[in-house]
Amino acid sequence: MKKFENFNDLLHYCQQESCTIGEAALRYEVGLGNRDEAAILSGVRAILAQMRATIESGLYSEEKSMSGLSGGFSKKVMDFMDSPKAFMSPLEHRMIAYALATLEENSRMKKIVACPTAGGSGVVPSVLIALADERQIPLAQLEKPLLAASLVGEIVSRRMFLSGSAAGCQAEVGVATGMASAALVEALEGTPAQALTATAIALKNMMGLVCDPVAGLVEVPCVKRNAVAGIHASASATIALAGIESFIPLDEIVDAMALVGQMMSPKLKESAEGGLAQTPTAIAFTKALHSRQSEASE
Amino acid sequence: MSSHGSLFDIMGPIMIGPSSSHTAGAVRLAQLAKNVANHPICQVDFTLYNSFAKTYQGHGTDRGLIAGILGVGVEDEAIRDAFDLATRQGLQYRFLVHEESNHYPPNTVRFDMTLQTGEHLMVIGHSIGGGKVYISRINEYNVSLRGEYPTLVMFYKDQPGMIWQVTKIIAEQHINIASLNCSRKDKGTEAFMAICLDSLLPEAQVEEIRQIPGVFSVCNVDKIPS
């Protein structure tokens, strides 16, 4: 069984076997012995279907979250797409709107796919489903790219916990962006080396990202951060597909990121004791929210 | 950190929001605590530590914990109505907040459960991100229990032949052992064994193991849905 001890190992395997990262990922999962190939692919199909279902149910919804901090954002971007002031491509508008829709559904306590976590759940679906919708690509063609993204996340997860409380947002939206970059390159038929270069570029630029959610909720800055991260993944994929390489190898970047996570103050790890969570606006909002909650529970 | 885990832990779980560690993780941790109890639960005191203590209401951690105790899954929209569900099913609960503890990881819960049998059971568990969880303590015993396999957790007197007697009973059921971990406090005192199985050991055999001289305590803990 091929376990892929690190990214270098994975790349060598793909080059030797002339396979994509998604194919290597499928063989990896088969090798774990939990389910056979057909069951794995049917699981991947169910995940892609749920990603699309979450986007569809949230895209034009104007329902607010429990806290009132989000809701109705994705519809605004879909509406803006047709405005004369719109300057990004329809694909990019969809990426932004789809990530917003996913995170807004998440904050309404609706059904989502954690990828790799709920806080970073908008990035991978937004780039893949937007690509599918804008280019009329059947979801079946995105199964391998999603597997590729997951193997990237899995290899990172061996060196750092994928949670904001353990390593900051770099471990959630950061890693999701690295995963989405690889998925995009594979979906666009780039090489395995290019896919991992895209991940490297994305992670280098997400390194150090703190987890500082207002009132501790997965809303500010998470909802919009996921939307921006899809564009970040797209830029990273474009740089890699253009043939530019990463000066620092991906394995070294992941080690550096894990160390940055350890150096990060606990106040910037999801505890709402630093960063945006300690701005005057956030403090005032948190006070008001807590008094609302204690009134409700009395 | 995991090593060589399933890709479905990365692209998943499919879950009710808003947080994989604070909502889905809470559900799964409570499911695992329920499986440790292995008997109907009447009352639970949830003591929340660190990040769980600070942000549990906004993340639906409280609803998730109750849902897990009631056997509701991470992708079930019933999580949102967990308080009503608890009332309907007669589960009593309290949430206690213990703000800071350097002793525990960020997202920690202590479950003090009263079972229908009248027994009390204390479990301490942690949510470590992406919906992954583990239990580190059952009553006075330190354990490491992740809920990925049906697991037989036992405490016994450190003496020759214990592993053989237990694995013999398992082998007679034609159940395969996925992994076996043993350790002891001091020679001849108390030992701990966790046996991960490919399927759950029937209760009759668990009872047989309880009767082995020198066995102090046995928990037959089913796995939780991945």
Image (tube, grey):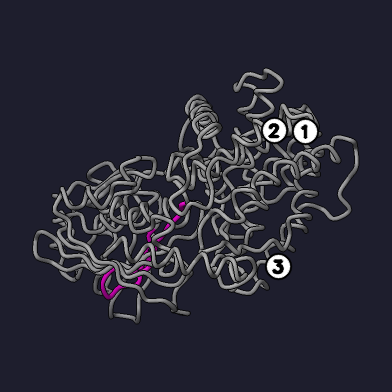
Residue B39 relative to residue A141: left or right: left
**Of the image marks 2 and 1, the number of the one nearer the N terminus:** 2
Magenta stretch: dominant SS?
Answer: strand
Residue tagged 2: A80
For mark 1, does the 10 Å Cα neighbourhood hold few (<14), some (14 to 19), or many (20 or more) residues?
few
**Of the image marks 2 and 3, the number of the one nearer the N terminus:** 2
Residue A113 relative to residue A83: left or right: left
Residue range of the region highlighted in magenta in the rendering: B131-145
Residue at mark 2: chain = A
**Pick the front one: A13 or A123:** A123
Q: In which quadrant of the rendered image does the C terminus of chain A lie?
A: bottom left
Residue A264 relative to residue A35: left or right: right
Please check whether the numbered discs 2 and 1 fall on a single chain: yes
Residue B101: horizontal and vertical position, in percent?
Answer: 44, 79
User: Decide: marks 2, 1 in contact (CB < 8 A)?
Assistant: yes
Q: Compared with residue A271, is residue A108 higher up or lower down, i.e. above or below?
A: above
Q: Compared with residue B133, is residue A30 higher up or lower down, i.e. above or below?
A: above
Residue B41: horizontal and vertical position, in percent?
Answer: 17, 57
Q: Residue A86 bears which disc, if any?
A: 1
Q: Amino acid at mark 1?
A: Ala
Residue tagged 3: A260
Residue B71: horizontal and vertical position, in percent?
Answer: 26, 47
Provide the secondary structure element on which disc 1 rests.
Answer: loop
